[in-house]
Amino acid sequence: MIKPSFFFRWPAGRSFSEGWHYLLFPLCVLVLLSACRGEEVGVGEEQGSITIKQVMPGGELRDPKYGKELWLAVGAMAGVEGTPANGVTDAHFFEDGTYVMGIQLNIERPSDGYFYEGWLVRENPKDTMSVGHLKSLFGDVRHFLKFKDERDLRAYTKVIVTLEVDDGNPAPARHVAEGVLKERTRS
């Protein structure tokens, strides 16, 4: 038989009113241990998922919100200046005048105080416009951006991604990835 003194020894010569706080620590340990659950997470188990809607070539596309697709362009994204990166960019122009562009880029996570920004570039006449910050939904190398505008931006065929310092400066910074949108026809 296990004696209660094995788990807890009352301070010698103390009454309950003088030593009640000695019971507090073992009681807290019991409460914490009882709150532990036996949940386990195994290696390779799915921790979450993402659904990416990607329009693929093949037949006429009619979007319920924007109408008939008039133009489709797709391009591969790749790292530049020794930056390992890969991905895809796509753009659509619809009959209601809506331009929708997306970037899916696999690139290392930026350090604290930095972010990736997407840009559209028109060659003639030369113009560059920001399309927003790329987001990593799972905190890993997969970065995404969706951009929508009510202007016809089909002349902006170069897509670049820059690594920006979060300092409020709107100018493009270090160029890390790029791609070229090439018009495709649906068949």
Image: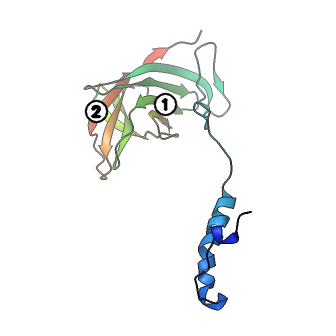
Name above or below for residue 55 compared with residue 38.
Answer: above
Q: Which residue is mark 1?
A: 101
Q: How many marks?
A: 2
Q: Kindly identify the amino acid type of the residue bearing the numbered disc 2.
A: His
Q: Tell me the residue at 62%/33% (across/down).
A: 46
Q: Position of residue 84 (x, y in %)?
A: 34, 26
Q: Are marks 2 and 1 in contact (CB under 8 Å)?
A: no
Q: Secondary structure at mark 1?
A: strand
Q: Kindly identify the amino acid type of the residue bearing the numbered disc 1.
A: Met
Q: Quadrant of the N terminus?
A: bottom right
Tell which circle, 2 or 1, labels the residue nearer the N-terminal end: 1
- For residue 5, which quarter of the picture? bottom right
Q: Which residue is mark 2?
A: 175
Name above or below for residue 160 compared with residue 6.
Answer: above
Residue 17 visible in the snapshot: yes
Residue 7 visible in the snapshot: no
Asked whether 41 or 149 is in front, the reply is 41
Q: Residue furthest right?
A: 1
CA distance separating discs 2 and 1: 19 Å
Number of residues whose C-alpha sits closer than 10 Å to that of mark 2, classed few (under 14), some (14–19) or many (20 or more)? some
Q: Tell me the residue at 62%/66% (across/down).
A: 29
